[in-house]
Image (tube, coloured by chain):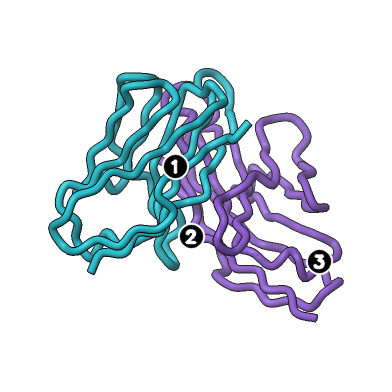
Chain colours: A cyan, B purple
Amino acid sequence: NAGVTQTPKFQVLKTGQSMTLQCAQDMNHNSMYWYRQDPGMGLRLIYYSASEGTTDKGEVPDGYNVSRLKKQNFLLGLESAAPSQTSVYFCASSYSGRGAYEQYFGPGTRLTVT
Amino acid sequence: AQSVTQLDSQVPVFEEAPVELRCNYSSSVSVYLFWYVQYPNQGLQLLLKYLSGSTLVKGINGFEAEFNKSQTSFHLRKPSVHISDTAEYFCAVSLGSGGSNYKLTFGKGTLLTVNP
């Protein structure tokens, strides 16, 4: 049981380049999330998906897009990378519905935009 | 909308000393509360959670937290810390009923440094 996996672990981009961060979970969770973590800012929600085929904006969605074509995968795209997107990106997943379910986190992707 | 305030950004302590990491939340409806830990260069893992019932919640690694509704607080405590507890700790809240109750709002984190 791998839990939540993310690829790549590290990435360096030049300003204006595009890329996709990949996230996969093998726990059959309904909900998946993308966060960014910056020093002193905690974790901020970029996008989330309550179920396969649905996505919604979080707190900081500008400059990103997402795709949830399969239940186990949640992709985060950067269309035209900017230095302000230098951050550590975490994917998470959880059950959803009535009640509170903990979120399970991946190991993170450290992205640097030069 | 709910919010979370972690009152200390850094807490240095000596090994075997007790520690309290403070968390206050703001919400107009009932909430669920969580504490997560992040060790260096790793993702987050759940320490403990409060859903309902007893206000004293016990978690992994000897940590516990107390939910205080009147003070809207959920402080994390450990009676005796170890070097290995050095990590960043995040308090988080989600709505207690209905709506998007699966989304979490995180505090900005408290870096606990345990010195020998």
At 51% from the left and 44% from the top, the residue drawn is A106
Crowdedness near tag 3: few (<14), some (14–19) or many (≥20) residues, C-alpha within 10 Å: many
Crowdedness near tag 1: few (<14), some (14–19) or many (≥20) residues, C-alpha within 10 Å: many
Q: Where does label 2 land, which residue?
A: B108
Camera-nearest residue between A32 and A59: A32
The answer to whether the residue labelled 2 contacts the one labelled 1, judged by CB atoms less than 8 Å apart, is no
User: Which structural element holds mark 2?
Assistant: loop
Marks 3/1: CA distance?
29 Å
User: Please, is residue B43 above or below residue A76 in the view?
Assistant: below
Q: Where does label 1 land, which residue?
A: A91
At 49% from the left and 47% from the top, the residue drawn is B26
Q: Amino acid at mark 3?
A: Val
Camera-nearest residue between B42 and B74: B42
Q: Amino acid at mark 1?
A: Cys
User: Which structural element holds mark 1?
Assistant: strand
Camera-nearest residue between A31 and B93: A31
Q: Position of residue B58 (x, y in %)?
A: 79, 44
Same chain for the residues under marks 2 and 1 in the image: no
Please identify the quarter of the rendering in which residue B42 is found.
bottom right
What chain letter is assigned to the residue under label 2?
B
Q: Amino acid at mark 2?
A: Lys
Q: Where does label 3 land, which residue?
A: B81
Front tag of 3 and 1? 1
What chain letter is assigned to the residue under label 3?
B
